[in-house]
Image (cartoon, rainbow, N blue to C red):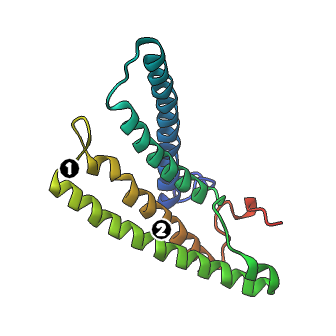
Amino acid sequence: MSNEHPDRGGPVARLGRVVGAVENFLITVLLTGMILLAGGQIILRDIWHMALSWGDPLLRVSVLWIGLLGAMIATREGKHIHINVLQRLVPPRLATISRALNDLISALICGTVSYYAVLFVLMDKEAGTRAFASVQSWVCEIIIPIGFGVMALRFLLCFLQRLMGKTPPLEDRIQTP
């Protein structure tokens, strides 16, 4: 007899919830920090005619992180951009196959980007380049392979669910005009 709640799913679903909670936490902290830092920079410049030398580079890096976290969340919630012209013109069975192929192609593209981003980050780590202050560039860039890797896994899981004849989570929330 299993101890898990029937609505909770298995280990993959639990891992998905943990990753989702981490994404939500990080995007909240980053956005709050960005607002505070940007506001602080404005006040420092306008009142004391000075600024934090690392403030603007950190804001630029935060934009990268928020953009990729937002893409991860959009993928998780099924609110990413869909190219579904074919799916509207074909019978439901072919539309399901088309969606599965879209998921597989998206997984392959995101996985490829993630792979090459890992190589890029490793090169920057080996080179020891600095982004700003004493922060190494690879630390700022690590979100690229992580973000695309998570999106690749989500697309792959959706593809596999469609292959098994199941509807991926949150599929019913996707609105098509």
Indicate which label's residue lies in the foreground, 1 or 2: 1
Mark 1 or mark 2: which comes first in sequence? 1
- Side of 16 where 53 appears, left or right: left
At 61% from the left edge and 78% from the top edge, which residue is drawn?
Answer: 102
Q: Residue 20 carries which label?
A: none
Element type at mark 1? loop
Residue 95 falls in image quadrant: bottom right
Vertical relation: 112 (above or below) 46: below
Image x and y of residue 167, in percent: 68, 70
At 43% from the left edge and 37% from the top edge, which residue is drawn?
Answer: 59
> For the residue carrying disc 1, how many other residues have a C-alpha within 10 Å: few (<14), some (14-19), or many (20+)?
some
- Side of 121 where 9 appears, left or right: right
Vertical relation: 116 (above or below) 49: below
Image x and y of residue 30, in percent: 47, 36
Image x and y of residue 28, in percent: 53, 36
Image x and y of residue 123, in percent: 21, 61
| Observer-nearest of 144 and 173 | 144
Vertical relation: 162 (above or below) 56: below
Q: Residue 152 carries which label?
A: 2
At 68% from the left edge and 73% from the top edge, which residue is drawn?
Answer: 83
> For the residue carrying disc 2, how many other residues have a C-alpha within 10 Å: few (<14), some (14-19), or many (20+)?
many
Vertical relation: 164 (above or below) 141: below
| Observer-nearest of 67 and 39 | 39
Tell me the residue that label 1 is attached to: 129
Three-letter code for the amino acid on which mark 2 is drawn: Ala
**Residue 94 appears in the picture as rendered:** yes
Three-letter code for the amino acid on which mark 1 is drawn: Thr
Element type at mark 2? helix
Residue 81 falls in image quadrant: bottom right
At 37% from the left edge and 60% from the top edge, which residue is drawn?
Answer: 145
- Side of 109 where 121 appears, left or right: left
